[in-house]
Amino acid sequence: MDSFSSWVAQLRKGVVELLVLRLLAARGPLHGYAISRHLQELGETVAGESTVYPVLKRLEAESLVTGAWIQEGEAPPRKDYEVTEAGREFLVKASEQWQTLDGALRLLEEETR
Amino acid sequence: MKPAHDNHAKSSTGARVDDYLARLEEALELLGPTEAADTRAELGSYLAEAARDGRVDEVLGTMGAPESFAAGILSERGMLATPGPLPSPSGARIAVAAIVDVIVAIAPLALGLPLAFLMPAQSMYAGATALNWIGLVIAIGILVITVGIWPWYYWRSRNRPGRNQSVGRNVAGLRTVRAGGEVRVVRASDMPRGRRGMTRAGAVIRFLVAFWIVGGVAYAMVYSYAQDRQSPPDLVLQVVAQDVGSAVGVTTQLTAAVMEAVSAGRATTEAPPDLLEDAAVETYLELLGSAIDNSARTYEITWVSEATYVEPDSPLLSDATFLVEALERGGENQAWRFTVRKDTEVMDDGTSSVTSYQISHIQIGERWAP
């Protein structure tokens, strides 16, 4: 893996966490497959299963999201996730941090023009 | 009706998904059995959704190998870091595990050797019972397992996770787990709790039950041996201990030397000095010497069996019991019983002569009933 790919992987890993929380906060309970599909619709390179799912499991382990098995009709049971109160607080702080970083980046870009 | 190749493709995909999920669950063992099984179920549901969209191959391709996908999950949880939340076990624990493993490996050998080479072998001389033969088969089985199968099983399972790990690691509270693509040894108490997997108490109970079973078989054989010899069970251990030192080789050499000396009219003390150390052998020598000049206080020789048919030019073999009792040694009465094999050569003219005597067995008892 070259330096750029490694950087993208690291960046994506941090961003996916934020994206998953924001998605769940906006759309309500979603199962893993739906979360992946939504994120893939945002852009092909945003996140794949190999990134989203491990992050989702960590968020659950850290109680930022909570999962519950749902059985609907004859379909196989699936696990729906939703953001917890701790997850919402985390999302607010993370969004602020992201805005700060984004602002700093934009500022530097303007200075270099 | 759907074409056959479509059904075949579906079943092939299903088998591939099942295999993927099984490998994933195994690779996630570090999460504990509950969460690993939960994740497997969730991924199964995930892939079922993907199958409905016709994206199974695509999703599996994105996930990568189950071991690397599991490694991603464990890495996110910080479980693959070194040192991570699951510290490596202490050297003391690993030492305990190694010691128990060595004991477990040696125990069958320690039990099997005397059972295989002493009791059944000697029973052949004195008349084996059905239980003796069963014991022989069991003993040989123990030896085969010890010499062959056990080391093979131990080697094969040394790095296998879960229930196949060694007894020592279970007793020491260690677990061999697969974490992603690697195998690690961790403390069981550090792992998440779950429904499945062997607890340390379970391992200890298994260990004790296994010892109880093997010990029970051994005791039953020893008891049977004692019954056959009409001797108290506690004396049988003395017998076995003495047999180890004297019955193999020593007694046969001794008897040959003594009988040669007796037949030549020489003193019995001409037998090799290193063969005279054992008290029973010394007594035997005394008795042989006393028998020559009729000075023995109490002794009896009983031929218990004689061959009635023999192939021409073959020696006649018969067992005899040489019973000696009430010899005062250190103020205590003692009794010795020697089972003697008598080799008789049959001549062409029909006459016969004893060619050699060999002690095949020696037993000690407080008093031997005639």
Image (tube, coloured by chain):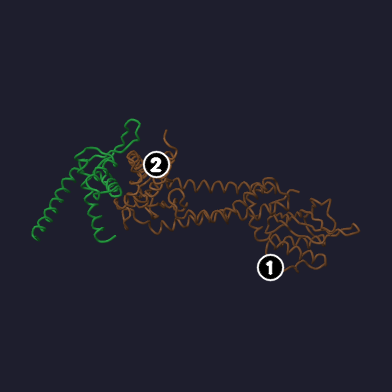
Q: Which of the 4 quarters of the picture holds residue A81?
A: top left
Q: Report the Cα–Cα distance between label 1 and label 2.
A: 63 Å
Q: Which chain does the numbered disc 2 sit on? A: B
Q: In this rendered view, identify the residue nearer to me: B151 or B292.
A: B151
Which secondary structure, mark 2?
loop
At label 2, the amino acid type is Arg
Q: Residues within 10 Å of mark 2 (few under 14, many from 20)?
A: few
Q: Name the one closer to the observer, B276 or B67.
A: B67
- Which quarter of the rendered picture does the N terminus of chain B lie within? top left
| Residue B335 position (above or below residue A85) | below
Q: Nearer the viewer, mark 1 or mark 2?
A: 2
Give me the chain that's brown.
B
Residue linked to disc 1: B274
Q: Please name the residue that numbered disc 2 is placed on.
A: B195
Q: Are marks 1 and 2 on the same chain?
A: yes
Residue at 83 percent across and 53 percent down: it is B310
Residue at point 72%, 60% (across, down): B283
In the figure, residue B264 lies in which quadrant?
bottom right
User: Residue B50, how many percent across, how many down?
Assistant: 33, 41
First reached walking from the N terminus: tag 1 or tag 2: 2
- Quick one: which residue is furthest to the right in this view? B349
User: Is B198 located above or below residue B117 in the figure?
Assistant: above
- Left or right: B255, with B154 as reference point: right
Residue B60 percent location from the top left of the image: 35, 47
Estimate the x, y position of residue B327 in percent, counting from the top left.
73, 57
Q: Which mark is residue A75?
A: none
Who's green, chain-wise? A
Q: Chain of mark 1?
A: B
Q: Residue B36 in the image: x percent, y percent?
A: 36, 45
Residue B326 horizontal side relative to residue B22, left or right: right
Q: Quadrant of residue B341?
A: bottom right
Q: Nearer the viewer, residue B261 or A68?
A: A68
